[in-house]
Amino acid sequence: ASYDMGGHDTYMHKEIHEQADAVDRVLRGRIDDRFSTVHLGGLNLDAREARRIRRVKILGCGTSYHAGMIGAQMIEQLARIPADAEPASEFRYRNAVVDPDTLYVAVSQSGETYDVLAAVQELKRKGARVLGVVNVVGSAIAREADGGIYVHAGPEVCVVSTKCFTNTTVAFALLALHLGRTRDLSVSDGKRIIEGLRKLPAQISEILQQEEEVKKLALQFAEARSMLFIGRVRGYPVAREASLKLKEISYIHAEAYPASELKHGPLALIEPALPTVAIVPDDDLLEKNRAAMEEIKARSGKILAVAHQPQEKADETIVVPKNEDELDPILMGIPLQLLAYHTALVLGRDIDKPRNLAKSVTVE
Ligand code: G6P
């Protein structure tokens, strides 16, 4: 790749720091204040069709799959349509039942990932309606889909995805708001989400200003052989993506688990040498998450919380700005991109080109 690094040592660092501008771009021209909704010109789905959707199935691989997990929750919460995400690579091999009332959404930064493309082609052959949430304009998946949303993250060079992940979650918030407002989401809830969306770029800049503190934390984590990432409901996909990011670039083993499932297994692993990163949003599950941290503390586990206020059960807290509950997952993973980055840097890894991985996997 020959894009200018703009004074950064790596593309990953540059791309992390481009996120406020990138989010600005995915929002630009799409907000409709008059009706408290958003316009998505390329969706190709009229209101009558939108109202007939009975399920949403989101397909993607790697980081795009995690963005889809966040998107599925947003669609359920804002549009009240049952939604879930699945790795495209699994979906295409299990002879899934293709249902005409389901809206399928293919997610891909490159728009070229073979497993996603093959899933889209199989779906289309069976008469399904497929939307694309894609970064690269005119890519194979964008062309194959019936319509979709471009995420406008700009070129992403680092093998691991950061700004495109964030923009994809914002694109899903737009889709969820749009579907919600053609169904039962109230005008005032629409307004509330729009206000939240508008706050995102400044809040991202605020998070990135904490880089020096996160860098210090990375020194501690670089010694770990393994790490646990936990979150509950909205926090769970954030934990999944943060653990993927850490393992991809630092090669430290990391496992993400729903905080609610700790007692069904992972608690057996807790000891001082296995640090936990806990995603602790200030929402209706705060007390539950505090209880999970307490369980870990009681077994001498070290905890780093990502939260909206300092957590006394945690050894360290990275405090992130609060947005609307539904939009919090967009922000909570961002400091953990920096944590993965600085951990990998301490360990001397090839951050932009981790071993054995490719930016897009265009073969089977
Ligand atoms: C590869 C990359 C990942 C990426 C995944 C999906 O595995 O290393 O960073 O998330 O492909 O790529 P896509 O372009 O479809 O989002």
Image (cartoon, rainbow, N blue to C red):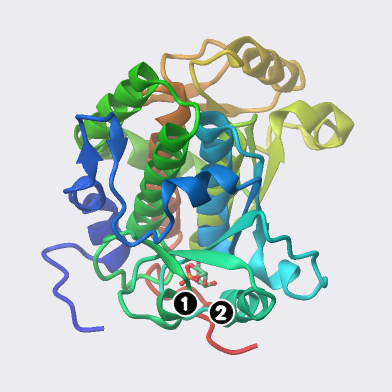
Few, some or many C-alpha atoms within 10 Å of disc 1 (few <14, some 14-19, many ≥20)? many
Residue drawn 37% across the image and 50% down it: 171
Please give the residue where the numbered disc 2 appears in the rendered image: 117
- Visible residue check, residue 227: no
Please give the residue where the numbered disc 1 appears in the rendered image: 141
Is 357 above or below relative to 85? below
Is 11 above or below relative to 286? below
In what quadrant of the picture does the C terminus appear?
bottom right
| Image quadrant assignment for residue 73 | top right
Q: Are marks 1 and 2 in contact (CB under 8 Å)?
A: yes
Where residue 299 sits: x, y (%)? 77, 22
State left or right for residue 364 relative to residue 145: right
- Visible residue check, residue 79: yes
The kind of secondary structure element at disc 2 is helix
Residue drawn 26% across the image and 30% down it: 35
Ligand 1 lies under 8 Å from the Cβ of mark 1: yes
Where residue 169 sits: x, y (%)? 42, 47
What kind of residue is marked 2? Answer: Leu
In what quadrant of the picture does the N terminus appear?
bottom left
Q: Earlier in the sequence, mark 1 or mark 2?
A: 2
What kind of residue is marked 1? Answer: Ile
The kind of secondary structure element at disc 1 is helix
Is 360 above or below relative to 36? below
Residue drawn 35% across the image and 70% down it: 158
Residue drawn 13% across the image and 74% down it: 4
Few, some or many C-alpha atoms within 10 Å of disc 2 (few <14, some 14-19, many ≥20)? many
Residue at the front extreme of this rendering: 48
